[in-house]
Every structure is written in structure tokens, then in C-alpha cells.
């Protein structure tokens, strides 16, 4: 297990290094100069040069990369060009919205998908299976931003059960904050839950055809007992993969939902920073999100080894 973990850790470090270089290169080649953008079209060249020096934009790109990367290792994400505040502070404020939203949506997605997938697999070919698969197909097909707008129309405007947008803040109380995130979380969770339910059903059906499952049935276990006692754990590897990918998507890819509900999260911060040509914010937030994605994949790999001992024996 230790050797397996160290190999995955080395892969994580290499992936982060390559990702940091690619992120820096892609963002730096974007057209436009932050100093010129901040000062306007009529700014004098010497004023632009002075601001570039103040922002650290007057050195070579290689030096800027190493300064940025080495500072991030110590937790220093730099200072925003636009707001003149530490990027780490801005990320910390927005993370308290995006991370709970992602966890809330993932929890709802899992609570929806596991019973639905298991129910459909246990009733393969029957009416229950057809209904569940039809519902999941609809969930996959509907864009989450359209579904979010329908949720606002029904539950915020017509029924007035929830606010149409914004975030009340955790200082108003835990349940008040959760209430503010409920509609966005449901909008994110239902499409992801539909995907996860289909994966769960497929994985369980594949396992049900294995020799050890037939042996369990031959020993007297019913189809449902064999599924719960032996099938579920062995079907978890592809399911864990999807859960890891979904959490990464929910954390890094919820920019549209945050825009629909006016949530002050990381996705909206990136959108605003791109509009303002605030490169240091874009680079730092994107790198943080990439780190979250790679770290989740690393944890999923470790979960593989826990669920399937065969992976540990091969390393």
C-alpha cells in the first residue's frame, strides 16, 4: 500500500508541475496588457511602464513564472491587479461559497443516484428499470443552466420558497446559508445524479454476470442478497471514478450556475478577473482548481486500493 501511495504521489507532483506551466503559458499569451487596461487608452507610456514595474510585469515571463510558482508553494498567491488585495484573501472568501455548494450538490447527487441505480439494476428489464433509466436520460439531456432558471421561476418567483439569487452568508446561521445554496445545489446535483445512477446500474449489471456472483447465487442467496453482499462493493470502482470527477466538476465548473444565482463563488471570481484582465487572480484560482481536481483523483486512486485489494498486490 505504501509503494502504491508513493507512486500516485509522484504522479500528482508531476501533474501539478506540468499544469502550472501550461496555465501560465495559456493565460500569458492572452491579448491585452493589464497595466494598459487599468489605466485606459489615453494613459501615458511612462505611466504604463511605472505601473508594469509596480505589478512585476516588466521582467521576463520565465522569471515571472518562477516567482509566481515559488510564492504559491508558501501560500502566497500574489496581489490582485484590480482590487489591490491579496489573492489568497479573495479566494478564501469565495471558497466558503463554492466548496459548500460543491459538497452539498455532491451529497444530493449521491443520495439520488445510489438508490436509483441499485433499484434499476435489481429490476433489470422491468417497469421500474425503464422508469428510472428514462428519468436519468432526461436528467442527462437537460442543460443545468436551463434547469436552474426553471427552479428560480417555480420555487423563487412563483412559490417564494427560496430567494432568486445571492448568498445570505454563514454569519446569518448555518441553515440560512444552506437555504441560500439549496436551489443552486439541486440544479447542479440532478444532472450529475442522473449520470451517476446510470454508471451505478451498468457497473452492478456487469458484476452480476461474474463467476463469484453465480457462485453466491448457487449457495442459496437471492439476487438481491447477492447484489448487496457481494456486488455493491465490487461495482464501486467505476462509481468512485465518476464521483471524483463530479466533485471536480462541481467545484471548478459551476461558473454558469453561480452567474444564474449571483453567488459570490470562485467561478464568478474567475469570470470577473478575466473581464478585468486580472491575470494573477485568473492564474492563481485556476491553479487552485486544478490542484483540487488532481488531489481528488489522487484520493480516488487511494480509495481504489482500499476497495480492491488486487490493486495493492500488483504494486
Image: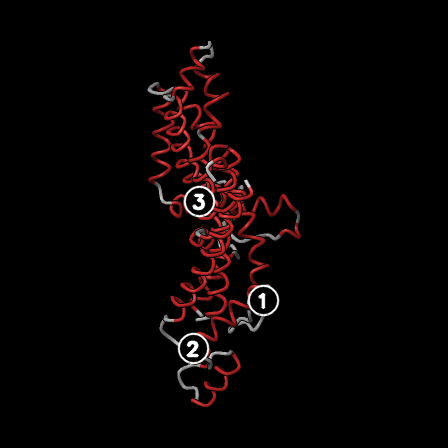
Q: Is residue 44 above or below residue 20?
A: below
The image shows residue 146 at horizontal and vertical percentages of: 38, 46
Q: Is residue 111 left or right of residue 218?
A: right
Q: What residue would you read off at disc 3?
A: 245
Dot 3 falls on a residue whose secondary structure is helix
Give residue 238's position: percent from left, percent from top.
42, 35
Mark 1, secondary structure of its residue? loop
The alpha-carbon separation of the residues under discs 3 and 1 comes to 27 Å
Q: Residue at x 45, y 51 (%)?
A: 254
Residue position for label 1? 76
Cα separation, mark 3 vs mark 2, equals 36 Å
Q: Which mark is residue 37?
A: 2
Mark 1 crowdedness (10 Å alpha carbons): few <14, some 14-19, many ≥20:
some
Q: Position of residue 77 (x, y in %)?
A: 55, 66
**Marks 3 and 2: which is nearer the front?**
3
Residue 262 vs residue 145: left or right? right
Residue located at (41% from left, 47% from top): 149
Amino acid at each position: 500500500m505504501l509503494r502504491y501511495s508513493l507512486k500516485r504521489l509522484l504522479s500528482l507532483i508531476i501533474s501539478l508541475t506540468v499544469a502550472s506551466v501550461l496555465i501560465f503559458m495559456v493565460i500569458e499569451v492572452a491579448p491585452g496588457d493589464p497595466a494598459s487596461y487599468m489605466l485606459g487608452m489615453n494613459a501615458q507610456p511612462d505611466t504604463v511602464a511605472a505601473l508594469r514595474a509596480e505589478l512585476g510585469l516588466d521582467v521576463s515571463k520565465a522569471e515571472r513564472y518562477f516567482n509566481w510558482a515559488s510564492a504559491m508553494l508558501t501560500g502566497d498567491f500574489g496581489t490582485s491587479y484590480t482590487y489591490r488585495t491579496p489573492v489568497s484573501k479573495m479566494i478564501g472568501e469565495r471558497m466558503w461559497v463554492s466548496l459548500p455548494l460543491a459538497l452539498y450538490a455532491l451529497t444530493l447527487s449521491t443520495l439520488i443516484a445510489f438508490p436509483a441505480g441499485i433499484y434499476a439494476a435489481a429490476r433489470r428489464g422491468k417497469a421500474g428499470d425503464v422508469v428510472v433509466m428514462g428519468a436519468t436520460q432526461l436528467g442527462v439531456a437537460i442543460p443545468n443552466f436551463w434547469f436552474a432558471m426553471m427552479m428560480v421561476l417555480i420555487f423563487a418567483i412563483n412559490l417564494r420558497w427560496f430567494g432568486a439569487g445571492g448568498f445570505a452568508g454563514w454569519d446569518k446561521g448555518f441553515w440560512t446559508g444552506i437555504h441560500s445554496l439549496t436551489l443552486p445545489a439541486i440544479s447542479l446535483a440532478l444532472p450529475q445524479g442522473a449520470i451517476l445512477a446510470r454508471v451505478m446500474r451498468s457497473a452492478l449489471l456487469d458484476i452480476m454476470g461474474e463467476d463469484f456472483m453465480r457462485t453466491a447465487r448457487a449457495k442459496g442467496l437471492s439476487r438481491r442478497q447477492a447484489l448487496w453482499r457481494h456486488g455493491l462493493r465490487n461495482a464501486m470502482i467505476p462509481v468512485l471514478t465518476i464521483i471524483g470527477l463530479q466533485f471536480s466538476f462541481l467545484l471548478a465548473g459551476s461558473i454558469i450556475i453561480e452567474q444564474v444565482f449571483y453567488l459570490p463563488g470562485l467561478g464568478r471570481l474567475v469570470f470577473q478577473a478575466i473581464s478585468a484582465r486580472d491575470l494573477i487572480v485568473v492564474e492563481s484560482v485556476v491553479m487552485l482548481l486544478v490542484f483540487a481536481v488532481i488531489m481528488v483523483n489522487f484520493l480516488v486512486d487511494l480509495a481504489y486500493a482500499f476497495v480492491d485489494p488486487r490493486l495493492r498486490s500488483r504494486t
